[in-house]
Structures are given as C-alpha cells and as structure tokens.
Amino acid sequence: MNALKKLSFCALLSLGLFAQTAHAESLKDTINYPDWLKINLFDKKNPPNQYVGSASISGKRNDFYTNYIPYDDKLPSETNTEKVAFLRAKMNAYSTLESILLTKMHHRIVKALQVKNNVINHLFGLVDFLVSKSILAKRFVDTTNHRVYVMVQFPFIQPEDLIAYFKAKRINLSPTSASNLSAILNKALFHI
C-alpha cells in the first residue's frame, strides 16, 4: 500500500511538472520576452554560460534574503528586486557548476591541481571562486507580471587568476598546472 501511495505521488508530481512545462510552452509565443530569456526559460537545453534568476517586484522586503543582500529602502523596489534576482541567478550557477565540477570533472581537476589533502574543500572552493567571478550580463523587467529577470555569465578564467586564488590558499600552482586547470574550467563553463 505504501509503495502504491509513493507511486501515485510520483505520478501526480510528474503530471504537475508536465502541465507546468506545457503551460510554459503555450506562453512561449504570447509573452513579449527578449530572445535570451525565452531560450533560458522555454528551451529544454539551456545555452552554455547563461544562468537566469528572477524575483517578483512586490515593494516589500524579502526577509529570507536580508542576510545576503544589503537592502536600501531609499531605492526603488525594482532595484532591490534585481539584487534578489541576481543572487538567485548566482545560486543557479553555483548549483550547476557544483554538479559539473564535483561529478563530471573531479578527477581532471584534482590531477591539474596536484593536491592530495582536502580535495573536496578545494573543489568547493573552486566553485565559490568561479561564482565570485560571475557578472551581470543581461536584465529584463516584466512590467506586466511585475518581475525582474537577470542573467549572469562567466568571463574566461585566466591562469593568472587561478595562481592568485590558490596562492591565497597557500597552494603554489605552477604556470603549467594553472593553464591546464584554466582550460578544464573554461571547457566546463563554455562547453567547448
């Protein structure tokens, strides 16, 4: 009976996701969004190096984010909302990079780093480092639905940036290792 309940729940969840996807598809041609946003919201395979976040313009402070975002009550609510959307886009990027670096590229990164201790901490640190490099690339305000969308992207990671980052962590990365690691990371970021 429990197995049947779980199966029913999974079926309902799948139907809900299917309905949501179908609804999004039906909206695709009716809403006036820029192409970059339509691609990221409605295409099944997102383009490389594009991470989108959004937030509702409500005029109210979102207490969940007050520890992470410096709200300024003197600014328009749209500006504060953009900060929330930017944080969400960075969280989206973090989650994706974490998955790629820790599961798919783990061995190649460790080999390039030539470290034996605290490997997992270095991998998570590398994800933090990459996300800190992300920049606000595009922005769109949906005035009809009162929502702000932003997209973050990453610049090409240079070997010098990696050498400086790891030097601060007391790891001496050789120029060759830094070049190898830079190539691996840029491949992950840009799918090249």
Image (cartoon, rainbow, N blue to C red):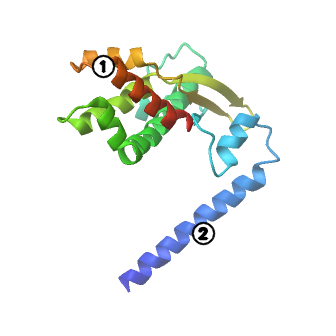
Q: Residues within 10 Å of mark 2 (few under 14, many from 20)?
A: few
Instruction: Please report whichever mark, 1 or 2, sits nearer to the chain's N-terminal start.
Output: 2
Is residue 51 rendered to the left or right of residue 183?
right
Of the residues shown, which amino acid type is indicated by label 2? Leu
Task: Pick out the residue farthest to the left.
Answer: 117
Give coordinates of residue 20: x percent, y percent.
64, 58
Quarter of the image containing the C terminus? top right
| Label 1 SS | loop
Give coordinates of residue 57: x percent, y percent.
61, 31
| Label 2 SS | helix
Q: Which residue is mark 2?
A: 15
- Up the image or down, 22 lies above or below 192; here it is below
Is residue 31 rendered to the left or right of residue 83?
right
Q: Which residue is mark 1?
A: 174
Q: Residue at x 34, y 42 (%)?
A: 106
Estimate the spatial distance between the alpha carbons at disc 1 and disc 2, rounded to whole Å: 52 Å
Of the residues shown, which amino acid type is indicated by label 1? Ser
